[in-house]
Structure formats: C-alpha cells, structure tokens
Image: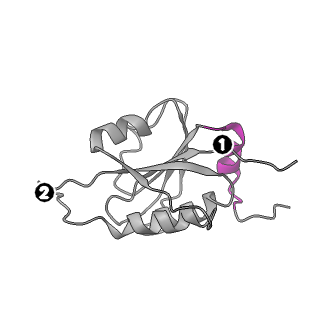
Amino acid sequence: MLKFSLLHPQILSSLGKAGHGSKILIADGNYPFSTRLGPKADLVCLNLRPGLVSVTDVLETIVTAVQIESAAVMEPSKTGPYAVKKDPDIFKNFVEIISQQNPSAPPIKLQRVDRLKFYQQASSPDVCLTIATAEQRIFGNLLLTIGVVRTVN
C-alpha cells in the first residue's frame, strides 16, 4: 500500500516514467485540452463538474510525489476582454503550495509566459502529463518542471 496521498494509477504511471526536466501541466476548465496536448503527454481528465476537482487540489497532491524545480503561469492580459488589473489570487495559492515542499528555501517565483507561448510550452514534447481539472478561477493553468531528488549517502 502507498504511504503518500497520490493514488491515481495513471498519474503515478506517468510520473514514474518522467524524470528531471519533464513537465506536468495542471490546467483549468477553460484550457483547450484536445488541441493543445503535447505529443508525448498522457491526458488525465479529472474534470467531473465545475469546480471539482480544482488545480490547487491536484497541485497539493502532486507536490507530495515529485520535486518541483520551476513553475510557469500564463501572463494575464492587461488589455482587452480578459484584462486583469492584478495577479489572480490563484497565483499566490500556487506559490504557497509549492513552497510547502521545502519551507526553509525561498518561495518559488512563478515564471510568467505570454498566452500563446504558454500554449506552445504546454504542448511541447517535454510535457509528460496533462491533467484536466474543472478549475473555474481564471488563469488557473500551471506548468511544472520536475526537479532532482537529492539523496543523502
């Protein structure tokens, strides 16, 4: 029996095949999963109904299983129909959850990527796993890079 919180068989399989530098996309309910899936990415659909399961629910579980080296978010537009005047609250949630991995280290800084470049990165061959959530908060897409697990001899 497993002793950590991640139990989903397909997610465990995908992470078991991944390594340092592999990427994981945890995406909100607005993300275009069918047209922006990486060629090597496994797609896991956890979008049962609006709001269930959220990106932060998934992130809280993923950080128990892999070391996060870096994280990227889609930069909110400052103009146009989807303009956002301040950072979405979910960005703060991302930093808080990832920082739980190593509380003594400085908080991780989210890399901000233009929307179209984010889509390119999220559909690249480096992405091993895409998790579709039913997150309703805007800009709830998070692209994680798996880091190195250091062991002490």
Viewer-proximal residue, 59 or 35? 59
- From what the image shows, is residue 151 above or below residue 96? above
User: Which residue lies under the disc numbered 2?
Assistant: 81
Residue 109 x, y percent position in the rendering: 44, 56
Viewer-proximal residue, 92 or 3? 92
Q: CA distance from mark 2 to mark 1?
A: 37 Å
- Residue 152 relative to residue 77: left or right: right
The answer to whether residue 65 shows anywhere in this view is yes
- Residue 30 relative to residue 59: left or right: left
- From what the image shows, is residue 16 above or below residue 98? above
SS for tag 1? helix
Amino acid type of the residue tagged 1 in the rendering? Ser
User: Which residue lies under the disc numbered 1?
Assistant: 14
Residue at image point 40% right, 54% down: 141
Dominant secondary structure (helix, strand or loop) of the stretch shown in magenta: helix
Residue at image point 24% right, 66% down: 86
Residue 45 x, y percent position in the rendering: 52, 52
Circle on res. 120: none
Range of magenta residues? 6-20
Viewer-proximal residue, 105 or 56? 105
Sequence order check, earlier mark of 2 and 1: 1
- From what the image shows, is residue 119 above or below residue 96? above
- What is the quadrant of the N terminus in the image? bottom right
- Indicate the quadrant where residue 32 lies: top left
How crowded is the residue under tag 2: few (<14 C-alpha within 10 Å), some, or many (20+)? few
